[in-house]
Every structure is written in structure tokens, then in C-alpha cells.
């Protein structure tokens, strides 16, 4: 058995890892970047870029560039860059630049001193982290796992990870689990450090000190269904993010952000169903997508962690 963090990373980003599979993440699950939802999300990203005074958007861990394709359709004036661990996807608009990432939690060296909106949509939840569990005597120990997903307890958690757990996710009851967010915090800080101006955003399933899941949130997705978390490279492995530990300038829900930007679900004038039936159908579809993106019990509960940059003060 080996620590979850090590095996998790190999299962997602190794040579035969999940994120390198030909079908891509969209072959197993849908995110807000896909389909009609993605079109609305692209509107939101474009507004944030405008509000930040930048003309470049860098999409980290962008899958096969679905969000960038929507952005290009809506805002061809924006300079767009996609970053992921795979080769450039076929069919991506030629105007979109593509850069291969050396790994799930790493940006290529050439992406630095950025003047851009850098967005990482559902990225931090797949940055592998240490998983720990309180044993029957009250000691917090690292969780180990084998290739079949069977678990055992290893050494007592110590050092910086123990300090993180004590400060951000204290656990004392036997059986309680902690997904140690230190690796996510460090990945976020590295991402933030790459920009000299603009805005850095991470969008993810998240929780804060008062809403930590007592038994953790590590799970898997395969072929559209929730699956057992087995590190076999055949499924996504994900755990929600402790967004309050990141140190972002602001963390708010997706629902709060869209409402702030004036993106709201409104029913189109029924009279246009006769005068402009196609426009009416499009407006209905957009309203439905906004309703889904702002549902507080679903996608509207996503956390948006945002840090703003002023040149010289990244």
C-alpha cells in the first residue's frame, strides 16, 4: 500500500492516467464548461475579463478546450490559451493557443508574468492531496491504498500537513477523515504567482471550516456515474476543496457571482414565441442554463476563489 496522494497523482496524470485517455473527461461526466451551460459560463468569464481590464484568458486544466471554444465564438477579440496534459485537441479553433502542462498541478514555465484572466475550472479538486483518518485511539494517521482501492492506515500525520490539519480541519473522533489541503494551497499560490496583473480564479466544489465533511469527500466518476474511488486510471478521482485555506482575496458562490454580474434567469416575453420563435427558444434555453448554474443546491453552490493582481504586487 502507498499514500493516497502518490497513487492518486499517477492514476490521473501518469502515462496511462485518466486525463490522458482518448475520450477525455467529457466521455465520463459533464461540467459547467460543456454544452449550453458552457455558453453561459463563457459569458461570465468574458465579463470578468472585461472587468479586470485584460484581453487574454488562460484556461488551466481545460480538458479538450470546450470553454475556450465557447469564448472564441462569443468573443473572438480575446486572446485565448488552453493548458492541459494532452496534445492539442482536433477541432479547437485555430485562434486558440494550446500549451501542454507537465502535470496536473503544474503550469508550463513559459506561462509567467501574465497579464490575463487565469481560470482553473474544476482543477483544484483533482490536485491530489494527502488523506488522513483518526484511528481508534484518536491518532490522525495517513491513509494508504492499493491498486484495488483497499485502504489501510499508515504513520501518524506530522509536519506541515499535520499543522494544516490542526489549523483548518481538526479531527479527533475515531473514523473521522481529513483531506489535507496543503497541496491545493501550494498549487493555488503557484498559480497566483504567475500573474503580474489581471485576475486568477479557481472554480470548484468547496467547503469551509463550518461545512467540512466529517468523513471526507473523496469519490470517483466513471461513464457518467459515481463510482468507488479506485486508483486504476479508468475513472476520475476527486475531493472537494477547502477554499477558505487558499488565501484568495475573495471566495463566493457561483450563484452570488452570477447575480453580482447581472446574469439572472428571466422568462422571455411570450409574444416573441410568435414573432421570433427561434429567438424565443434560444432565450428559453439560456434562462434554463442560468437557472441550473445558479441553483444553490447544485452548481450554484460552487465556490469561486478569486485573487486580483496589480502589476508589481502579484
Image (tube, rainbow, N blue to C red):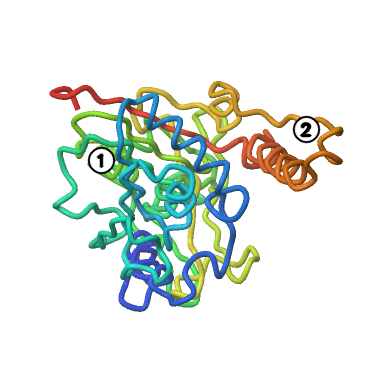
Residue beneath the point at 46% across and 40% down: 203
Locate the N terminus by quadrant: bottom left
Q: Residue 56 in the image: state x and y as whole percent.
A: 30, 40
Residue beneath the point at 23% across and 28% down: 197
- The residue mark sitting in front, 1 or 2, is 2
State the residue in front, 156 or 205: 205
The residue carrying pointer 1 sits among few (fewer than 14), some (14 to 19) or many (20 or more) residues within 10 Å by Cα, namely few
Q: Is residue 6 above or below residue 313?
A: below
State the residue in front, 184 or 74: 74
State the residue in front, 56 or 146: 56
State the residue in front, 125 or 86: 86
* Residue bearing mark 2: 268
Residue beneath the point at 33% across and 55% down: 96
Element under label 1? helix
Residue beneath the point at 32% across and 42% down: 182
Q: Quadrant of residue 187?
A: top left
The residue carrying pointer 2 sits among few (fewer than 14), some (14 to 19) or many (20 or more) residues within 10 Å by Cα, namely some
Rounded to the nearest angstrom, the CA distance separating label 1 from label 2 is: 54 Å
Would residue 309 be found to the left or right of residue 63 on screen? left
Would residue 269 be found to the left or right of residue 6 on screen? right
In the picture, the disc for residue 279 is none
Q: Residue 282 in the image: state x and y as whole percent.
A: 71, 45
Q: Earlier in the sequence, mark 1 or mark 2?
A: 1
Locate the C terminus by quadrant: top left
Element under label 2? loop
Q: Residue 170 in the image: state x and y as whole percent.
A: 45, 34
Q: Residue 210 in the image: state x and y as whole percent.
A: 55, 27
Q: Is residue 141 above or below residue 87?
A: above
In the picture, the disc for residue 160 is 1
Amino acid at each position: 500500500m502507498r499514500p493516497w496522494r502518490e497513487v492518486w497523482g499517477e492514476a490521473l496524470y501518469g502515462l496511462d492516467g485518466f486525463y490522458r485517455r482518448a475520450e477525455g473527461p467529457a466521455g465520463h461526466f459533464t461540467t459547467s464548461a460543456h454544452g449550453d451551460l458552457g455558453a453561459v459560463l463563457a459569458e461570465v468569464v468574458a465579463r470578468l475579463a472585461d472587468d479586470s481590464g485584460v484581453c487574454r484568458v488562460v484556461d488551466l486544466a481545460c480538458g479538450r478546450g470546450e470553454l475556450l471554444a465557447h469564448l472564441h465564438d462569443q468573443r473572438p477579440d480575446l486572446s485565448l490559451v488552453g493548458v492541459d496534459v494532452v496534445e492539442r485537441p482536433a477541432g479547437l479553433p485555430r485562434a486558440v493557443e494550446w500549451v501542454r502542462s507537465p502535470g496536473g498541478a503544474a503550469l508550463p514555465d513559459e506561462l509567467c508574468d501574465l497579464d490575463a484572466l487565469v481560470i482553473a475550472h474544476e482543477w483544484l479538486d483533482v490536485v491530489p492531496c494527502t488523506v488522513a483518518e483518526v484511528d481508534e485511539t484518536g491518532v490522525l494517521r495517513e491513509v494508504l491504498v492499493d491498486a484495488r482501492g483497499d485502504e489501510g492506515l499508515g504513520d501518524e500525520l506530522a509536519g506541515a500537513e499535520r499543522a494544516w490539519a490542526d489549523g483548518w480541519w481538526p479531527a479527533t473522533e475515531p473514523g473521522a477523515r481529513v483531506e489535507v489541503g496543503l497541496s491545493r494551497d501550494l498549487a493555488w499560490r503557484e498559480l497566483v504567482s504567475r500573474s503580474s496583473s489581471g485576475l486568477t480564479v479557481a472554480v470548484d466544489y468547496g467547503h469551509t471550516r463550518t461545512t467540512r465533511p466529517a468523513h471526507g469527500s473523496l469519490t470517483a466518476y466513471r461513464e457518467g456515474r459515481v463510482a468507488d474511488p479506485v486508483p486504476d486510471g479508468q475513472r476520475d478521482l476527486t475531493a472537494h476543496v477547502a477554499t477558505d485555506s487558499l488565501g484568495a482575496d475573495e471566495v463566493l458562490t457561483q450563484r452570488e457571482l452570477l447575480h453580482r454580474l447581472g446574469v439572472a434567469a428571466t422568462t422571455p416575453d411570450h409574444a416573441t414565441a410568435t414573432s421570433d420563435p427561434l429567438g424565443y427558444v434560444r432565450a428559453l434555453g439560456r434562462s434554463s442554463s442560468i437557472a441550473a448554474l445558479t441553483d444553490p443546491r447544485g452548481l450554484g453552490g460552487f465556490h469561486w476563489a478569486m485573487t486580483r493582481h496589480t502589476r508589481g504586487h502579484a
